[in-house]
Amino acid sequence: MSTVSVSAPVSQRKKVTTLTFRQKKEHGEPISMLTAYDYPTALAMDMAGVDSILVGDSLGMVVLGYENTLPVTMEEMLHHCRAVARGAKSALRIGDMPFMSYQVSVEQAVRNAGRFLQEGGMEAVKLEGGRERVDAVRAIVAAGIPVMGHLGLTPQSVNQLGGFRTQGKSASAAKRLLEDALLLEEAGCFSIVLEAVPARLAEFISQKISIPSIGIGAGLACDGQVLVTHDLLGLFERFTPKFVKKYADFHGEMKRAFGEYLSEVQARQFPGVEHSVETTDEEWQAFLRVASS
């Protein structure tokens, strides 16, 4: 009687929650966050020990090929959220609320936020904006859904901001960002992303709020950091923001691999014998007899 060998399951680390975020800030421990849009990427991040995975509406640009994040729909977001949820079990999973999914009314904002948890397998949502989003944040939190804020460069407002530009450089703009951060904290956000703001301002805001700040292009003093994974891996070649560090060149490696495959197919070098399957000589001869009868 044969036995089947079953590999021992990979030990699962302790679940990261919004409470973990607050505890890390209190203890001065940096928070790590990355974006993911599919199962294998989320699985690899979870195994690597990333604290939080954001299913960002950046998928519109780096996965779906849109010019910006504005065309991304709720259905597209939920599709990718479900894939990520299958791969990430320990990291805190956050769904990015797309353009016009929370701006029309507070009721719509709460309903769509709930869909991220009910249909997308997320554990929190992120939305952009400051004082103009306080009512929506308060209502979503009241419904039992954790909310991450997002200030500074808010891509969904790219047309209003005049492009992808650093925010909070003037004294008045910096003061407004600080006020917005305090308002979001008061409304119940468990953390706030600070994107493309001066490092000194991000540090000042981080010290003034009791909830964690997650920086992207906002310097080293934030309580945590986030990057778009396709930028980090060198997979998105359209442009690379100044604040991105490329840890790999997967786009170049993909082009190399595709080129090698193409050359071998054209030269009839692939597939080789080791990549092919065969039947036995006896069965092949039997087939020939049947085929010729």
Image: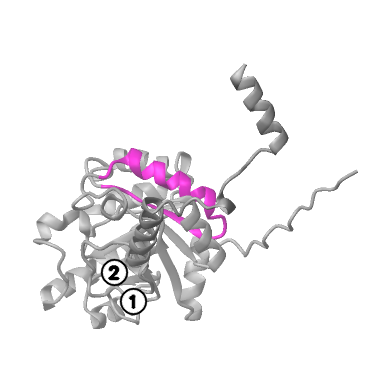
Which quarter of the image is occupied by the C terminus? top right
Disc 1 or 2, which lies upstream in sequence?
A: 2
Asked which quadrant contains residue 127, the reply is bottom left
Q: Secondary structure at mark 2?
A: strand
**Closer to the eye: label 1 or 2:** 2
Q: What is the three-letter code of the residue carrying label 1? A: Ser
Q: Is residue 75 magenta?
A: yes
Which numbered marker is on residue 206? Answer: 1
Give the residue drawn at x 64%, y 61%: 12
**What residue occupies the far top of the structure in this picture?**
293
Residue situated in front as seen by the camera: 286 or 66: 286
Q: Secondary structure at mark 1?
A: helix
Give the residue drawn at x 57%, y 51%: 273
Position of residue 6 measured from the top left corner of the image (x, y, whole percent): 76, 53
How packed mark 1 is, by other alpha carbons closer than 10 Å (few <14, some 14-19, many 20 or more), is many
Q: What is the three-letter code of the residue carrying label 2? A: Leu
The segment highlighted magenta reads 72-98
Give the residue drawn at x 57%, y 46%: 276
Which numbered marker is on residue 194? Answer: 2
